[in-house]
Image (spheres, grey):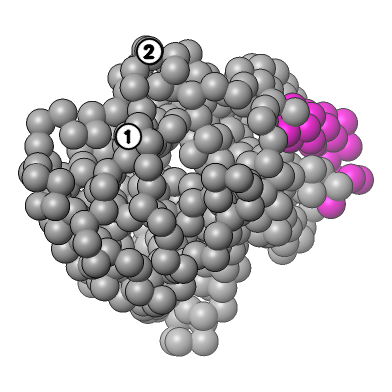
Amino acid sequence: MSDDLLPTLDRPDASSTSARRPGAPQPAPTGPGTTAQAPGTAQPAWLGPVLVVGIVLAALNLRPAITSLGALFEEVRTGLGMSGTVAGLITSVPALCFAVFGITAPRLSRRFGPAVVVCAGMAAVSAGLLIRPFTSNAAGFLAASALTLAGIALTNVLLPVIVKRWFPGRVGTMTGLYSMALAAGTSLAAAATVPLTDALGGSWRTGLLIWAGLALAAVLPWLPLARRTRRQARAEARAAGSAAAGPGTDAGPRVVRSRTAWALACYFGLQATGAYVTMGWLPQIFRDAGVSAGTAGVLLAVTMVMGVPLAFVIPGVAGRLRNQGPVAVTLGLFGLAGYAGLHLAPAAGAWAWALLLGVSNCAFPLAITMIGLRAKSPAGVAKLSAFAQSTGYLISLPGPLVVGALYQHSGGWDLPLTLMAALMVPQIALGVLAGRDRTIEDECGMRD
């Protein structure tokens, strides 16, 4: 099924840039690249609100599987008898799965529709989180984790497509909403997993299992959405007199030919590198500077919590700009200041550096916003999202390992922090290139 056959809930008025109320019946889109709607396809009142709830719940579940494990990793390693090599493999699996499984999302979206694939992705997340606590060895734990991460990877790629398809006039606002939910889920799991585990008896298995409930809740709104959009697409395909998955339908641009796509992929990779290094090593940087372990953990939480409000604000601001380069520059300068501060006075200005890096890490919602803006059609967004995220996560894989190796080799943080500050320079330059007002369809010389 082509996602071009799915109806739009929110499209700007022809004479105004203001968006319509989500869920309200919309006129059929017209013009190149659109599909005539079948008779009787007016949208029910429940569709818009349920879609918003589904997006928020899906986003809430994109990181707890990772950060909850991080909070209990030592207990999991001991309980399953993991070797250091296997433990290192597990820490690198998320980025690898995001790269490998994310690249399959556009093809699955074209065949089944994005709502169906997101529903299946949330089901995979739930299944993996339900199975993982009951595994008895590292291999089973790794397999269950991979199932969960595969579902996260598909949803990572397709949420920008969902936003582009149903809220084309509110890309920035809707991206901000789910980016904020993603940041909230990340912070919640990191902060609450250990206290909840202690309150529920102290078993790491229970501590990991509780997040399966949140994932199961995320499946529920996507069930009616998947069912309706699948049925809707079939009806519209019959009305148009063509098969829903006919050859050449919504083929989308060849993104590898686009300079903007490459700039966005590399920008995504460098910001992901900074985020993973921050999550993995920031507490150790503070502890080595004389900060207590408890305070170091709170400082990391401050860095992560900064993403909750800013993840909503930044996409909204970026979505109203024709060129997002200045936002990328601003975030990069915050990062440079944070790394410089950690280098010069890590303990004395610890709270300031944590805040600065928290702002800098909001390059993620900016990158997601630019993915939605740099393509004209949902099919283009699907391909660009898969390419940028998969390539970006591959780029980010060596970062935390290299930083750890430099730390061990040099015996301090001067060299690793110099590297991270140096990487901010190409990140800023790539953000400027990716933020230019152009689309991958135009660069590839292809139609919408």
Q: Nearer the viewer, residue 444 or 219?
A: 444
User: Residue, x 34% and y 17% (percent of image)?
Assistant: 446
User: Which residues lie in the magenta part?
Assistant: 327-351
Q: On the image, numbered disc 2 is attached to which residue?
A: 445
Q: Position of residue 349 (x, y in %)?
A: 89, 45
Q: Nearer the viewer, residue 155 or 185?
A: 155
Q: Position of residue 408 (x, y in %)?
A: 58, 29
Quarter of the image holding residue 353?
top right
Please tell me whether residue 350 is drawn above or below residue 443 in the rendered image.
Answer: below
Task: Please name the predominant secondary structure of the magenta segment in the image.
Answer: helix
Element type at marker 2? loop
Q: Is residue 101 visible?
A: no
Q: Which numbered dot is residue 163?
A: none
Q: Nearer the viewer, residue 24 or 203?
A: 24
Q: Position of residue 409 (x, y in %)?
A: 59, 23
Q: Nearer the viewer, residue 446 or 184?
A: 446
Q: Position of residue 389 (x, y in %)?
A: 42, 35
Q: On the image, numbered disc 1 is attached to which residue?
A: 33
Q: Residue furthest right?
A: 348
Queried whether the magenta region covers residue 349, the answer comes back as yes
Mark 1 or mark 2: which comes first in sequence? 1
Queried whether the magenta region covers residue 186, the answer comes back as no
Element type at marker 1? loop
Q: Is residue 264 left or right of residue 308?
A: left
Q: Quadrant of the C terminus?
A: top left
Distance (Cα) linking label 1 and label 2? 15 Å
User: Residue, x 54% and y 49% (percent of image)?
Assistant: 12
Residue type marked 2: Gly
Q: Is residue 145 left or right of residue 424?
A: left
Please tell me whether residue 321 is drawn above or below residue 132 in the rendered image.
Answer: above
User: Residue, x 35% and y 68% (percent of image)?
Assistant: 43
